[in-house]
Amino acid sequence: MLITRASEYAILSLILLSSASEPMDSETLSRELSIPKSFLAKILQALAKSGVLKSYKGAKGGFALDKMPKDISMLAVMSCVEGKAPAVFECAPAEKSCPSEQASVCSIWPFLHKLQGKIDSFLEELTLADIVEE
């Protein structure tokens, strides 16, 4: 599945944080976006660890963008929260890693591989700035 709940929640959080004038804590984000706090906290921590967000401690702590929205690609965000690059199909990215070991004789693998490449390129070019502006 290309867009999981984790990716969706990450993107929604980034949209809200992009318009915030100061860091927002996970409780506030959770409440405003109606996202379970514990799940959102894990997502925010992953984004902070990858350098998309900056984490602030203390009474006025929370999370804020650590990059400009134009520098945050959706491929990077989704890969970060999923722990791997998003895939549209349950098909191996390379013939050698095909779980059924049938890629060399699979008539649809070349098409799926090409399509996944186009989707990856699109997600790499699509930035938070593009989404916020729409």
Image (tube, helix red, strand yellow):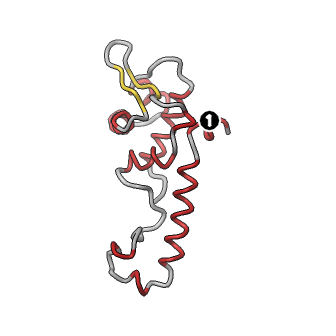
Q: Which residue is drawn at 45% across and 44% down?
A: 77
Query: Is disc 1 placed on a helix, strand or loop?
Result: helix
Kind of residue indicated by mark 1: Val
Q: In which quarter of the image is residue 50?
A: top left
Vertical order, 43 against 121 (above or below): above
Q: Which residue is drawn at 61% across and 40% down?
A: 131
The spot of residue 38 in percent (x, y) is: 32, 35
Vertical order, 56 against 127 (above or below): above
Vertical order, 128 against 28 (above or below): below
Q: How crowded is mark 1: few (under 14 residues within 10 Å), some or many (20 or more)?
A: some
Image side of residue 96 versus residue 1, left or right: left
The spot of residue 1 in percent (x, y) is: 46, 60
Residue furthest top in the image: 59
Q: Quadrant of the C terminus?
A: top right
Image side of residue 64 versus residue 126, left or right: left
Q: Residue at x 50, y 77 (%)?
A: 110
- Taking depth in this image into account, of 15 and 127 the one nearest to the observer is 127
- Taking depth in this image into account, of 104 and 108 the one nearest to the observer is 104
Image side of residue 62 versus residue 118, left or right: left
Query: Residue beneath label 1, please?
Result: 132
The spot of residue 113 in percent (x, y) is: 49, 70
Q: Residue at x 40, y 80 (%)?
A: 103
Q: In which quarter of the image is residue 27?
A: top left
Residue furthest right in the image: 134
